[in-house]
Amino acid sequence: MNLQPPFRNVTEVEGYYGTKEFTAFVADAARIVASYRKTLKSKVDFTGLRDHSQAETLYLSFAEPTASRLASEWNIPLDRVQQLLASRNLRTHPHTEAFDNEFLGDELYDRNEVDSLAPYATIRGPSDMREASSYEPNLLQ
């Protein structure tokens, strides 16, 4: 857990934490969280600062696959995947700058639209991959 430190040359406002007070408060809270995490019987390595970003990239590349990724998942040639996608008139969309910073590219499909073309049965995913959705899969029942 890291929080962005206050900007330099911050104007102090009466009735609010000053920069030094706020920085000390955040540091104390971070120590409490780190201490608590050490008591957990968890396999999660909380020191992996890039792990969250990497997991998010994996999730997004699944939720918004390229034709190339689908060819790999479905174990069929790319040209066949492209034919299947074209047969349903499925269109790509560009990456979302707020979420993936161009890493995934601009030829992305919606997972919910392409799963019906898969050569195997799939489980319905959430209706929205990033926000609260009208449907969430319950794999425990």
Image: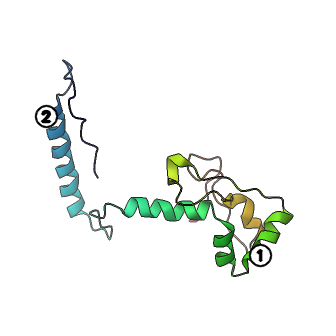
The percent coordinates of residue 75 (x first, y second) are 69, 82
Total number of numbered discs in the rendering: 2
Please name the residue that numbered disc 1 is placed on. 79
* Helix, strand or loop at mark 2: helix
The percent coordinates of residue 126 (x first, y second) are 63, 55
Which amino acid lies under the numbered mark 1 shown in the image of this protein?
Asp
Give the residue drawn at x 57%, y 45%. 132
* Helix, strand or loop at mark 1: helix
Does any portion of residue 138 appear in the rendered image? Answer: no
Front in this rendered view, residue 8 or 121: 8
Give the residue drawn at x 69%, y 77%. 74
Does any portion of residue 95 appear in the rendered image? Answer: yes
Which amino acid lies under the numbered mark 2 shown in the image of this protein?
Lys
Question: What is the number of the mark on residue 2?
Answer: none
The percent coordinates of residue 32 (x first, y second) are 18, 50
Q: Quadrant of residue 141?
A: bottom right
The percent coordinates of residue 137 (x first, y second) are 61, 59
- Would residue 134 appear left or right of 117 to someone viewing this image? left
Q: Quadrant of residue 79?
A: bottom right
Mark 1 or 2: in front is 1
Q: Quadrant of residue 52?
A: bottom left
Q: Which tag, 1 or 2, sits closer to the chain's start?
A: 2
Please name the residue that numbered disc 2 is placed on. 20
Q: Residue furthest top?
A: 14
Q: CA distance from mark 1 to mark 2?
A: 59 Å
